[in-house]
């Protein structure tokens, strides 16, 4: 990334990220922020993000909060500087896997609960949904474990701590 802004190649990537994440239900500016942070060699302040993306600081601030909640962005600090800085959170990939697993846990439980209702017992599509959710969870849990192992082997990285799934949280409270 150049001091005076982003190169044409970087801008194409950033815009592609915006469009990709927009299709995933994240505002386009959020995807653009992620794209920029993936390319950044150093933490970027809110004002720098806004300037480089040519958007309002308020828009960056709003989207940064959403991206932090999603685990893909984390705050960073620079000693002696009071501004708020942000970096792409590499452990965010692990978080995304856990979010997908948790969503299937919830969907599977909703369908399982529905099957317990007298008027809904034996519904083939509900049983199939429960089976799919169980299959998805098993596959994604294995993928998450393989990702953590791969991530931990990379120099300069720490193993992201596994986020308990909805099922694990439910079982822990029983």
Image: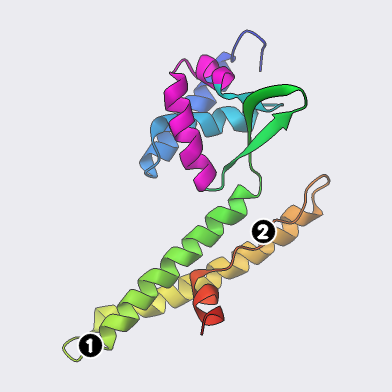
Say which mark, if any, is on residue 147: 2
Q: Nearer the viewer, residue 158 or 10?
A: 158
Query: Is 41 located above or below residue 54 in the figure?
Result: below
Question: Callout 1: 10 Å neighbours few (<14), some, many (20+)?
Answer: few
Q: Majority secondary structure of the magenta segment?
A: helix
Q: Quadrant of residue 126?
A: bottom left
Q: Position of residue 92 (x, y in %)?
A: 60, 48
Specify the farthest residue to the right: 155
Residue 26 among those drawn in magenta:
no
Q: Looking at the image, is mark 2 or mark 1 earlier in the sequence?
A: 1
Q: Nearer the viewer, residue 90 or 153?
A: 90
Is any part of residue 127 visible from this angle? no
Q: Which residue is located at x 80 percent, y 54 percent?
A: 153
Specify whether 147 is left or right of 22: right
Q: Position of residue 173 (x, y in %)?
A: 52, 80
Say which mark, if any, is on residue 117: 1
Q: Position of residue 111 (x, y in %)?
A: 31, 77
Residue extent of the magenta highlight: 47-69
């Amino acid at each position: 990334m150049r001091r005076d802004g982003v190169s044409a190649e970087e801008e194409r990537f950033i815009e592609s990220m915006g469009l990709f994440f927009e299709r995933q239900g994240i505002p386009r500016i959020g995807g653009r922020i992620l794209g920029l942070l993936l390319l950044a060699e150093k933490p970027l302040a809110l004002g720098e993000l806004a300037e480089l993306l040519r958007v309002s600081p308020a828009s960056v601030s709003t989207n940064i909060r959403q991206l932090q909640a999603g685990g893909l962005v984390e705050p960073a600090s620079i000693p002696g500087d009071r501004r708020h800085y942000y970096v792409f959170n590499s452990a965010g990939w692990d978080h995304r896997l856990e979010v997908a697993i948790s969503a299937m846990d919830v969907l599977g439980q909703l369908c399982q609960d529905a099957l317990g209702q007298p008027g809904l017992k034996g519904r083939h599509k509900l049983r199939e949904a429960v089976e799919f959710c169980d299959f998805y969870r098993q596959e994604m849990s294995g993928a998450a474990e393989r990702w953590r192992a791969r991530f931990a082997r990379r120099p300069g990285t720490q193993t992201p701590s596994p986020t308990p799934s909805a099922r694990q949280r439910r079982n822990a409270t029983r």
